[in-house]
Structures are given as C-alpha cells and as structure tokens.
Amino acid sequence: MKNTRTAHARILAAAVVALLLSPARSTAHHPEGLTLDQLTRRASVVVEGQVTAVNSAWNAAATQIHTTVTLRVGSYYKGDLRRNVLQIRMLGGTVGNMTMAVLGQPTFALNEQVTLFLKPNFEERDVPFVGASEGKFRVARDPVTGQDFLANGHLRVSKVNAVETIERIMRPVLQAMNAGGAKEE
C-alpha cells in the first residue's frame, strides 16, 4: 500500500513539475483554438502518416511515463526530414495499471491516420505538438462526400483545403530558398 502511495506521489509530483517548467507559450492558445494558418506557421514539421506503434514506459528514475508514437510517413507538407518512419516521444501514458495524464496531450491509436504539426526541436520536448492536442489531426473519410478531411477538437477541414493552406503559407519560404535566400521557417 505504501509503495502504491509513493508511486502515485512521484507521478503527481512529476506532473506538477512538468507543468510548472513548461514555458507558458507552449500551452497558451486562443480559447477558440488555433487556426490552420497559425498551426502551420508555428510548426517546424507538418507530416501525415499512419500510427504503427504506441508504446509507454517509465523513465530510468521511475518518476515519469513517456509514450513513443511510431508513424509510417506518407507525406511531409513542411520540413521534410527524409525519414520514412518518425518516432515522437511525449510525456504521459499508461504502464500496467498506472496512468500519467498530461492536460492537452493528444492520444493515439494503432493504425490511426494522422496529420501532425510538430514544434521546432520536437524531439527534445515533452509536449512536441503545436497547440498540444490541437497539433494532432485525425484523417478520415466523409461518408457522404467520400472526401478525406482532417479533424481535431476545434477544426474540421477538407484535406484538399488543408494541403492548399499549408502550400500557400510555404510558397514564399520555398521561393526564397530557391533564390538562395532564407531558410525554411
């Protein structure tokens, strides 16, 4: 019983520390949600793919649970990493009967088709998504129109419109790069 309480106290303490140490800008967003333009501009990588694995494990000190999501990449819309498989590590998850939940952190399901808006240096962050859960879109097919759409908790947009928006935002950056100028934003 005491070990269970100690483990719960460690997890709670770790969650509070993670929350307190997170920069305000990583969780601050408009109450109505970020727009697709805002998500695209803030992301260093926008990628679509299929979730092939979701694995959670304790850190070495057994004070935090991290989940690694493995994504088979279908397309990079921004920030081509030239990887066919991408692993995204985030704070939170379930190991055995212990769950560490992080407010705003998205969840993933095996075989889920997703589009992700990842922060700069996402591989070093506990919350790697722009706008937390807003940076994860589920890709699905509309049963009425037969067209693919992207949806998160705030937005639902046709995949065609989403890709066009991302390309519109990226066009000046790519033109500058091709002219030998600026780096990708």
Image (cartoon, rainbow, N blue to C red):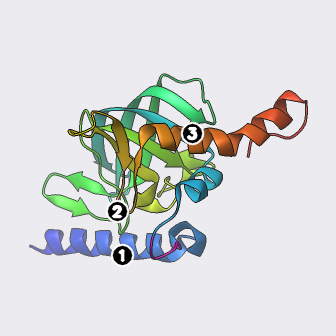
Outermost front residue: 145
Which of label 1 and label 3 is nearer to you? Answer: 3
160 and 122: which one is in front? Answer: 160
Question: Which image quarter holds the N terminus?
Answer: bottom left
Q: Please give the label number shown on residue 13.
A: 1
**Mark 2 or 1, nearer chain start:** 1
**Mark 3 or 2, nearer chain start:** 2
Q: Is residue 89 above or below residue 98?
A: above
| Residue in the image at 91% along x and 30% along y | 180
Secondary structure, mark 1, is helix
Q: Residue under label 3, please give it.
A: 164
* Contact check, label 2 and label 1, Cβ < 8 Å: yes
* Contact check, label 1 and label 3, Cβ < 8 Å: no
From mark 3 to mark 2, how far is it between C-alphas?
A: 43 Å
Q: 84 left or right of 95?
A: right
Q: Amino acid at mark 3?
A: Glu
Q: Is residue 35 above or below residue 14?
A: above
**Mark 1 or 3, nearer chain start:** 1
In terms of secondary structure, what is the magenta stretch mainly? Answer: loop
Q: Position of residue 2 (x, y in %)?
A: 14, 74
| Residue in the image at 29% along x and 34% along y | 53
- Range of residues picked out in magenta: 28-32
Quarter where residue 182 is shown: top right
Secondary structure, mark 3, is helix
Q: Residue under label 2, please give it.
A: 63
| Residue in the image at 22% along x and 61% along y | 99
From mark 2 to mark 1, how far is it between C-alphas?
A: 8 Å
Packing grade of label 1 (10 A; few <14, some 14-19, many >=20) is some
